[in-house]
């Protein structure tokens, strides 16, 4: 099938859906200039072993090494803007088509693009927790300070070390978020996978749950994924190019549905 036909088919499936959900991964934010920090090609691992610095053990053993590692990534996230793929998903939600975005990303870009219901499987950089008094804090100030100096961020209340609320290697995913994501997958009749190569659990498991519950999968990712064979539509292209095209076609189709209804 031609790319045009695949895009049209994806739009038709979404326009007819009752409960579509999206699942996004690192590839959704790479057009915004955020590297996939789990990828060995991201440039973030040249001076550090991920399992060492970005694990919960590593954080506890050597927080300085953790913050030295995350500093360039934090700077990129502060400077990043949502890309057309983020806005396309926010538009699909506003049209009433998309019921939730499940994401592996920690960068907040879905919220900043206007998505309302976002399930962040790996947490987010928006808040931090004090490792001593467990106080939760918004992180605007913290990241500015982390980027500007090599000092470790401390809790304004008790002086304890702050840890961003992102899931590090060796940490469990937030249980309530994971449970909600699994329920969404099982309730969905369409799952749009965008910019995830489905290599990391539980991302890999969610489309499978959706398919087992009878959903159709639309796959938009640069690289082939293990779920391509089960998908109704597979498009190996840039999400920032394809998703806006799909969203525009869904909008047209929804308009026609509205005009045709009595
Ligand atoms: Zn504290």
Image (tube, rainbow, N blue to C red):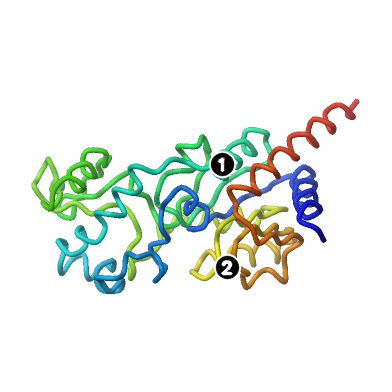
Label 2 CA crowd tier, 10 Å (few <14, some 14–19, many 20+): some
Q: Is mark 2 within 8 Å of ligand 1?
A: no
Q: Quadrant of residue 207?
A: bottom right
In the image, residue 186 sits, relative to residue 254, either above or below, namely below
User: x%, y% of residue 79?
Assistant: 35, 42
* 84 lies above or below 209: above
Quadrant of image for the N terminus: bottom right
Q: Which mark is residue 84?
A: 1
Q: Is residue 9 left or right of residue 67?
A: right
* Residue closest to the far left: 159
Task: From the image, state whether disc 1 or disc 2 is nearer to you.
Answer: 1
Residue shown at 17% from the left, 43% from the top: 145
Q: Going by the image, does 207 lie left or right of 150?
A: right
| Element carrying mark 1 | helix
Q: Marks 1/2: CA distance?
A: 27 Å
Q: Mark 1 or 2 closer to N-term? A: 1
* SS at circle 2: helix
Residue 220 vs 112, above or below: the answer is below
Circle number at residue 205: 2
Q: Residue 70, image x and y in percent?
A: 26, 57
Identified at 56% across, 57% down, the residue is 195
Place of residue 139 in the rendered image (x, y in percent of width and height, measured from the top left): 26, 42
Count neighbours of disc 1 (C-alpha within 10 A) and say few if under 14, some if 14 to 19, many if 20 or more: many
Q: Residue at x 64, y 67 (%)?
A: 208
Which of the two residues, 34 or 159, is positioned nearer the viewer here? 34
> Which quarter of the figure has residue 56?
bottom left
Counting from the top left corner in percent of width and height, residue 148 is at 17, 45
């Amino acid at each position: 099938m031609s790319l045009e036909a695949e895009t049209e088919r994806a739009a038709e499936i979404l326009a007819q859906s009752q409960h579509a959900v999206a699942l996004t991964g690192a590839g959704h934010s790479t057009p915004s200039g955020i590297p996939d920090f789990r990828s060995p090609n991201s440039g973030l691992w040249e001076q550090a072993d991920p399992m060492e610095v970005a694990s919960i053990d590593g954080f506890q053993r050597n927080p300085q090494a953790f913050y030295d590692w995350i500093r360039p990534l934090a700077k990129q996230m502060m400077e990043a803007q949502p890309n057309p793929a983020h806005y396309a998903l926010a538009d699909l939600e506003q049209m009433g088509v998309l019921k939730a975005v499940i994401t592996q990303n920690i960068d907040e870009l879905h919220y900043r693009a206007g998505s309302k219901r976002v399930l962040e499987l790996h947490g987010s950089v928006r808040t931090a927790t004090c490792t001593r008094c467990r106080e939760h804090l918004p992180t605007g100030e913290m990241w500015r300070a982390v980027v500007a100096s090599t000092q470790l961020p401390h809790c304004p209340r008790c002086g304890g070390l702050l840890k961003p609320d992102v899931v590090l290697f060796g940490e469990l995913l937030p249980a309530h978020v994971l449970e909600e994501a699994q329920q969404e997958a099982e309730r969905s009749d369409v799952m749009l996978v965008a910019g995830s190569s489905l290599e990391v659990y539980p991302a890999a498991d969610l489309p499978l749950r959706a398919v087992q519950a009878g959903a159709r999968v639309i796959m938009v990712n640069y690289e082939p994924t293990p779920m391509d064979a089960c998908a109704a539509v597979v498009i190996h292209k840039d999400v920032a190019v394809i998703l806006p095209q799909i969203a525009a076609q869904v909008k047209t189709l929804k308009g026609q549905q509205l005009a045709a209804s009595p």
